[in-house]
Image: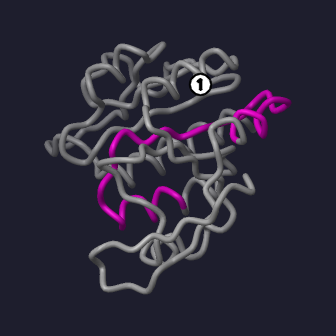
Amino acid sequence: MSKGGWREQTKDFNLKPFKYNYATLADIIGAGKNDAHALVLVLDHITDVGNFGAIVRSAEVVGVTGIVIPNARSVQVNEAVFRTSAGAIEHVRVAREANIADSLRRLKSAGFWVAGATEHASELIWDAPLDGQLAIVLGSEETGLSRLTRELCDFEFKLPQRGQTQSLNVAQAATAILYECLRRMN
């Protein structure tokens, strides 16, 4: 983790201030530099604390290299995230970046493939090239991936489904995606 300044996070959740030492995108890229299976999650404006905490927990269990979130219009690390992640947030690098599109460009420049997880994709996850250094982008609970984010993805995929519900909750989808990535790594 970066030794950058500690930031105090307080939201409208009636929680005590929570200190978390955010990483930088450079920290995450550096941590994955020598890992042929480096896996980064990029969260495109996830706003629900419960979803974020659940994603962090799954990400830590699977061993992601890091998570990237935007500075604005996104949940931040706080005590509720600590609780919903069952403390996993203490073991995951999270970088807050001003611009998700710029972050995706930087990940690509560092050798990462960028994959968008969206229900609008034509390719199923089973057929997606989830090999090598990979950044997976998950969209917001309400609007999914933004137009610019989708344009920056090298490819998109979706989870298969048989039921009538349009899609999974973003945290549930993240867990399914992360375990498919782990299965392929092994």
Residue 72 to residue 157: above or below: below
Left or right: residue 26 compared with residue 104: right
Q: Residue at x 61, y 56 (%)?
A: 22
Residue 146 to residue 84: above or below: above
User: Toward the viewer: 22 or 113?
Assistant: 22
Q: Provide residue 139's location: percent of width, then percent of height.
A: 33, 38
User: Toward the viewer: 158 or 4?
Assistant: 4
Q: Residue at x 39, y 31 (%)?
A: 117
Left or right: residue 93 compared with residue 116: right
Q: Provide residue 64's location: percent of width, then percent of height.
A: 65, 46
Left or right: residue 113 compared with residue 139: right
Q: Quadrant of residue 51?
A: bottom left
Q: Provide residue 155's location: percent of width, then percent of height.
A: 45, 15
Q: Which residue position holds label 1?
A: 130
Residue 184 to residue 155: above or below: below
Q: Hey, which residue is sitting farthest front in the picture?
A: 5
User: Toward the viewer: 142 or 61?
Assistant: 142
Q: Hey, which residue is sitting farthest right in the picture?
A: 34
Left or right: residue 120 compared with residue 104: left
In which quadrant is the N terminus drawn?
A: bottom right
The secondary structure type at the circle numbered 1 is loop
User: Toward the viewer: 28 or 117?
Assistant: 28
What is the three-letter code of the residue carrying label 1?
Leu
Residues in magenta?
Answer: 28-56
Q: Hey, which residue is sitting farthest left in the picture?
A: 164
In which quadrant is the C terminus drawn?
A: top right
